[in-house]
Each structure stands twice: as structure tokens, then as C-alpha cells.
Image (cartoon, rainbow, N blue to C red):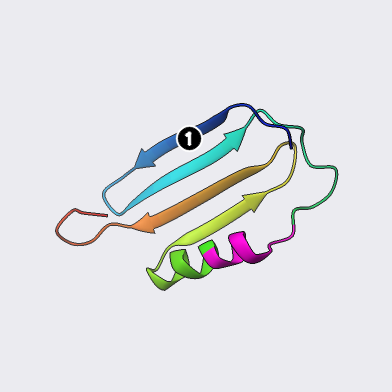
Amino acid sequence: AEATKLYAEFTENEEAASVTVTNNGIPPTEEISEGGGLSSLRSRVERFGGEMLVQSFPEFSLTVTVPKRKEGLL
């Protein structure tokens, strides 16, 4: 996508922590389909009870949310 910059926004609350990743690359012209890298990441995130959202429009973004452990660590 010819990106030169990567942006990461972190948020958290008492139950979970999230990161949303975007870039300044060329927006997708069609829906992003998960392949090896995204599928592998989704599998790992879901194994720990998290969720992953891939958005194609109006720009690509990837949001990963994971629950916090009881002791307050990710």
C-alpha cells in the first residue's frame, strides 16, 4: 500500500486493552481478505479470549482487543 507511516492508538478500560493500527498508505480498492498473517494473528488473539476487527473502508485499520488478566496485566 506504499505506506511510509504507521499509527497505533492504544485504549484501555478495567476489562480490556485495545490497539488500532492504521497507516498512510493507499486505501484498499476492495474488501481485505484474511490470509496467512492476519489469520494467524486472529487465531492467537482469539486463543486468549480477545477479538480482532479488520476494516477495509474508508481506510485499512486493524483493531485488536484483549481482556486483562485478574492481576491487571495484559
Residue at 48% x, 35% y: name it: 8
Q: Residues within 10 Å of mark 1 (few under 14, many from 20)?
A: some
User: In the rendered view, does 59 fall on the left or right side of 67?
Assistant: right
User: In the rendered view, does 8 fall on the left or right side of 70?
Assistant: right
Residue at 67% x, 31% y: name it: 3
**9 in magenta:** no
Residue furthest to the right in view is 29
Vertical position of residue 48 compared to residue 67: above or below: below
Q: Toward which corner of the image does residue 71 lie, by quadrant?
A: bottom left
Q: Nearer the viewer, residue 58 or 34?
A: 34
Q: Toward which corner of the image does residue 2 lie, by quadrant?
A: top right
Q: Which residue is denoted by mark 1 in the rendering?
A: 8
In the rendered image, residue 50, in percent from the top left (x then y), is placed at 43, 63
In the rendered image, residue 16, in percent from the top left (x then y), is placed at 34, 53
**39 in magenta:** yes
Residue at 55% x, 67% y: name it: 40
User: In the rendered view, does 58 fall on the left or right side of 37?
Assistant: right
Q: SS class of the residue under badge 1?
A: strand
Q: Which residues are magenta?
A: 33-40
Residue at 45% x, 67% y: name it: 44
User: In the rendered view, does 34 fall on the left or right side of 31?
Assistant: left
> Which quadrant is home to the N terminus?
top right
Q: Magenta: predominant secondary structure element?
A: helix
